[in-house]
Amino acid sequence: MAEFVEGWFLGHTLGEGAYGEVKLVINKTTGEAVAMKMIDLQKHPDAKQNIKKEATVHRMLSNPNIIRYYGQRSEATMEYIFLEYASGGELFDRIEPDIGMPLWEAQKYFKQLISAIEYLHGHGVAHRDLKPENLLLDDQDNLKVSDFGMATVYRLQGRERLLEKRCGTLPYVAPEVLQGLYHAEPADIWSCGIILVALLSGELPWDEANPQCVEYIAWREARYMSLTPWKKLDTIPLGLIRNILTHAPTSRYKIADIKHHRWYMQNLRKDDSEDCVDGGRVKSLRYDDEDITRLGLSQPEFPDTENQSLHINADERPGFSFSQPAALEDLFLSTQPVQNTQTSQNTFQRLVRRMTRFFVKTDYEETVRRLVKSLKEQNYICRSNDIGIITVYTVDRRKSPLVFKAIILEMDGQILVDFRLSKGCGLEFKRCFIRIKERLDSVIFKGSVTWPVGVKTKTMP
Ligand code: ATP
Ligand code: MG
């Protein structure tokens, strides 16, 4: 395993962002993990200012439902941001396309989201890119708002300024943001409403909340009861959504209204709601200890990184006064990274739960061959490189580009095929994944998508 700076190993890629990758870095001695967002300034010369702003805003924040900012490191052509590692992956991965998730779970995440937004707005910060891909989960499935790349301060010393920048991700963007002059708070709240629809139905209601979009027109004119996703929703959560996805920002629910809504206050219990929401399928999102035993996989042992949120909660000051990984300063302070690629004897494994992956019975070469063949039969354009990464290009239902990667890894002596979205709609990506998986069914270990897996960082030769 390559060493990033002395004492810290470079782990696997956690995700891809607009400006580069996010990687795991692991402390050699303690096993503690930190997420490292990397920005290649040669590829994105315009990114430097953005990163500065992201860091400036993010470092002020300290809340149990917000990813903790640890620090930054600048090199000649690279910028790095170090963040609390969310081992549960993206909330996005808990959404089953066209289904969503059990009511109680959606409610839990929605409440944690609202709590984070209440904190942000209380501090005059707008996020401006709220979507399930930017909501991460920790090892205990607590939601953590992440990605402050679009965030901005809209209220300072009690004075609010109107925002102008059209930013965010189109299906989640409020109508007034598209117009170009807007108040920060209702715009973020709108995105929370779209997220709630996605959690409860596994769908996004429209491409864009603009006056030309037929789905949006139907919603505004209240001609939607027979349409999806609305017809899937119960009247109480639908009532809440109606009040959040209100066209005029001034009549839109505020945080306080949301918190007093009947659905928000309902005591949804795990057992109750699993019966209501297509129990079996939704339940299959959760991992199963039996599956692990069956395959002879053992749960990797690693030092507990502690539930840092408990400490953060007690201390709202920015800085490093809370519990955090040891020797963290080494990541920011030394000026040059260690260049050697020495290999560790230890196999660092981390728990990562992600739905878009499966183990196969075939060996590495056969897996690549079958996968490429199957992708081509499904009319995907794909490009494979020689380190086990296949990039797949297609368009979604709405004809927008969709790009994702299939990464073939050897893990605990098994071959894992891990799919990751690079560009486009995440729900569409997941629909593609399900179709690809169906076609490879005969070689896939059953139940494999849902295991917690220890990911070895070495990619196949
Ligand atoms: P974009 O602008 O495309 O949304 P970005 O460049 O701002 O992306 P992030 O959203 O911060 O990048 O990170 C990209 C992905 O990396 C996330 O969606 C997530 O999957 C993963 N990731 C980011 N931060 C963490 C973290 N702290 N722990 C675990 N995974 C993370
Ligand atoms: Mg992001």
Image (spheres, rainbow, N blue to C red):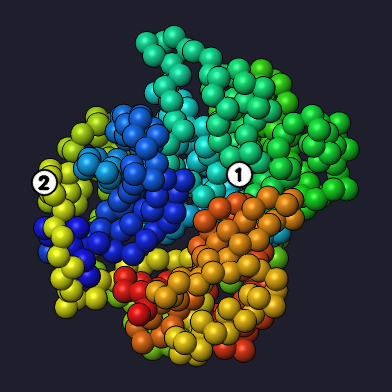
Instruction: Indicate which disc, 1 or 2, sits on the residue closer to the N terminus.
Output: 1
Apparent side of residue 31 relative to residue 15 in the rendered image (left or right): left
Apparent side of residue 55 relative to residue 164 in the rendered image (left or right): left
Q: Looking at the image, which residue is at 60% across and 17% down?
A: 181
Closer to us: 261 or 161: 161
Find out if the beta carbon at label 1 lies less than 8 Å from the nearest ligand 2 atom. Answer: no
Q: Looking at the image, which residue is at 55% across and 44% down?
A: 131
Kindly identify which residue carries mark 1: 195
Counting the numbered discs, the total is 2
**Which quadrant would the C terminus be assigned to in this image?**
bottom left
Label 1 element class: helix
Q: Looking at the image, which residue is at 42% across and 10% down?
A: 158
Q: Residues within 10 Å of mark 2 (few under 14, many from 20)?
A: few
Is residue 151 visible in the rendered image? The answer is yes
Instruction: Say which mark, if any, is on residue 130.
Output: none
Q: Position of residue 460 (x, y in %)?
A: 37, 79
Quadrant hosting residue 380: bottom right
Up-down relation of residue 220 to residue 64 (above or below): above
Quadrant hosting residue 309: top left
CA gap, disc 1 and disc 2: 40 Å
Instruction: Say which mark, if any, is on residue 334.
Output: 2
Amino acid identity at mark 1: Ile
Closer to us: 414 or 369: 369
Is residue 65 visible in the rendered image? The answer is no
Amino acid identity at mark 2: Ser
State which mark lies toward you, 1 or 2.
2
Up-down relation of residue 364 to residue 389 (above or below): below
Quadrant hosting residue 65: top left
Apparent side of residue 6 relative to residue 448 in the rendered image (left or right): left
Q: Position of residue 135 (x, y in %)?
A: 48, 47
